[in-house]
Image (tube, grey):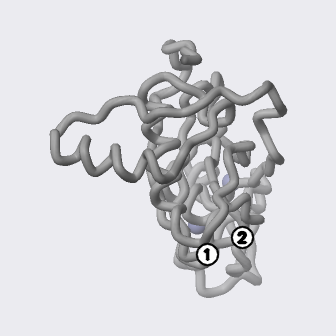
Amino acid sequence: MILWKTEYAVAPVLQILHWNTKQHWITISNIGVRSTGVINVYDSKWYDDDIALQNMLAGFLRCATDKLTVNFMHVQHQSNNTDCGLFAVAFANSLAFGQDPTALRYSPVAIRRLLLQQLQDGMLQPFPSTVIPPHRPILRTKVLQLYCMCRMPDDGREMVQCDRCDSWYHVSCVGLDNTARDWYCNKCCVV
Ligand SMILES: [Zn+2]
Ligand SMILES: [Zn+2]
């Protein structure tokens, strides 16, 4: 078993999310991450990210930072189109028990049987897995620039720039109806 450091620079996040545009379950966590504004995505299909995922992550995390760094982790790739939920549970299980999912290989058949047993028993325990040879734990990293008071990425909505601090805001979030004249954000309006 690989034990991770249990000291956190930030409040720990461990969540299974449904990625609507891919009809797909993934696990996200900052366990093992040492700085704010960073999230690891454990995706058993290794899908390319899209705006839907970016919005879901930013909306869920509501980072106070200017950027959200998303690490797509090098976890086991599922061999069918049905086990994403099982893998998402397995990744969450390993993280919760201090294991690094990128270092593990799971047997979906064994985990499916054990998960049912554990749910019936009302007691979750570490799933069986084998440790695989060391490899790069991160497949790729994407840095999302966050804007506005909603702290969301640029998703194509119309934006307006503060004429004092140059920060960008969604027109719909600040309730602006005329972007032609000078405009100052809430932070810059405070005297
Ligand atoms: Zn906004
Ligand atoms: Zn401003």
Circle 2 sits in a helix, a strand or a loop, which is it?
loop
Coordinates of residue 30 in the picture (x, y in percent):
56, 34
Q: Ligand 2 is found in which quarter of the picture? A: bottom right
Coordinates of residue 58 in the picture (x, y in percent):
58, 56
Q: Is 99 or 66 nearer to us in this picture?
A: 99
* Mark 1 in CB contact with mark 2 (< 8 angstroms): yes
The residue that disc 2 covers is 50
Vertical comparison of 102 with 81: above or below: above
Q: Is residue 102 left or right of residue 117?
A: right
- Quarter occupied by the C terminus: top right
Residue type for callout 1 = Lys
Mark 1 to mark 2 CA distance (whole Å): 9 Å
Residue farthest bottom in this picture: 177
Callout 2 crowding tier (Cα within 10 Å): few <14, some 14–19, many ≥20: few
Vertical comparison of 131 with 157: above or below: above
Q: Which mark is residue 22?
A: 1
In primary-sequence order, the first of circles 1 and 2 is 1
Circle 1 sits in a helix, a strand or a loop, which is it?
helix
Question: Which residue corresponds to the image point at 58% horizontal and 17% vertical from the top-left?
Answer: 2
Vertical comparison of 171 with 56: above or below: below
Residue type for callout 2 = Asp
